[in-house]
Amino acid sequence: MAGQSTRRVTRPPRHLADLDPAGRRAAAAELGCEPFRGDQLARHYFARLTDESGDMTDLPAGIRDGLAQALLPKLLTGVHEASSDGGTTHKTLWRAVDGALVESVLMRYPDRVTMCVSSQAGCGMACPFCATGQAGLTRNLSAAEIVGQVFAGAQALARGRIPGGPGRISNVVFMGMGEPLANYQAVLTAVRRLSDPVPQGLGISQRSLTVSTVGLVPAMRRLAGEGLTARLALSLHAPDDELRDELVPVNRRWKVASALEAAFGYASTTGRRVSIEYALISGINDQPWRARALASLLAGELAHVNLIPLNPTPGSRWTASTPAATRAFVEVLQAGRVPVTIRDTRGRDIDGACGQLAADAASSGLALAQA
Ligand code: SAH
């Protein structure tokens, strides 16, 4: 089995979830079947949540396997699972057909189920506090590889495999591994497929999807023009360019002011309040003066701040802000009338929390051992 350094980057095979309804019909026709077979397959995948040809008894036996092999190839194989919070937080490490490793996390709450998905294997953005950023980019995921992570969660819920009884995915956040807007087309297709009504897609309200970005300004502007109602999150982490250049290196290219301008532009075009992500790092970005600077940047804008207690990554010298510093930061924002929430830290104990997703050497070793 090839090691990471020699792994070849390949394009994953085409899958039903990459295609819109017209594309699926055309693909069925290309395979010598009636076009409506594409719709039937979509019903199995998106409505019945199965990709096993044996379940598809409404398809003639002679074409069932061929169609499923061609349009529902197994793109992701679960190679490791970890649970916490009584099984209601569930992380999966997936191996793609070329060996690339990605992770997704399902989090069940009393009133909703959120899936955190990866958009790339690895990440090229190199944010020094983020576990994924340390390893660099392996490759972009295809739309179907992104949708497939949600499909798996939806299937596990529907089949009652997550404690709490059968359920549905209500929210998806593109906050796993990777920079979604550096994989623009696949992420856009995935957003459409996740939100297309069943059985064209998974039927999750677009308003419940969040695309999170380091601030790739041209892509943010382009996204604003796609006619979406999905939420945009901007990972700001500092209100000043000097510190943000260090924490989010892409800031050297697109500064705080232009990233915010693009975020506010998205908010005004879509009517969706933009979420400003801010990981509180003790003594680094949590000073009251930075809270005041942040409040004045956001005053009167359609934005809210989501504070994330830093999840220290292995080898990092940074730690999470103290409760007192966090409280003081929150109070400054509130005094400036900026809405603020504090992100919960589900899955910390299974390395499933924000910024901890990294297919590290240990998990790769496990993956390869089980391959
Ligand atoms: N690349 C995208 C999405 C991936 S990460 C982005 O940067 O927005 C999702 C969020 O987790 C981002 O806000 C990211 O900055 C944050 N994050 C990364 N590492 C973290 C860590 N160690 N502790 C807390 N938050 C972290």
Image (cartoon, grey):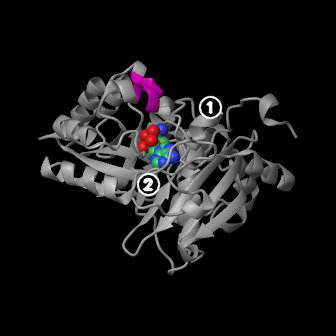
Where in the figure is residue 207, as x and y percent of width and height?
31, 53
Q: Indicate the secondary structure of the residue bearing disc 2.
A: strand
Where in the figure is residue 135, as x and y percent of width and height?
65, 35
Q: Does the magenta stretch include residue 183?
A: no
In this rendering, the answer to whether 199 lies above or below 259 is: below
In this rendering, the answer to whether 185 lies above or below 311 is: above
The number of numbered badges drawn on the structure is 2
Our reading of the magenta stretch's main secondary structure is: helix
Q: Residue furthest bottom?
A: 165
Asked whether 328 or 102 is in front, the reply is 328
Residue at 75%, 56% (x, y): give it: 62
Dividing the picture into quadrants, the one containing residue 240 is top left
Whole-number angstrom distance, CA of label 2 to CA of label 1? 22 Å
Front of the two marks 2 and 1: 1
* Span of residues in magenta: 244-251
Where in the figure is residue 5, as x and y percent of width and height?
79, 30
Residue corresponding to mark 1:
137
Residue at 49%, 63% (x, y): give it: 346
Residue corresponding to mark 2:
172
Asked whether 339 or 316 is in front, the reply is 316
Q: What residue type is disc 2 on?
A: Val
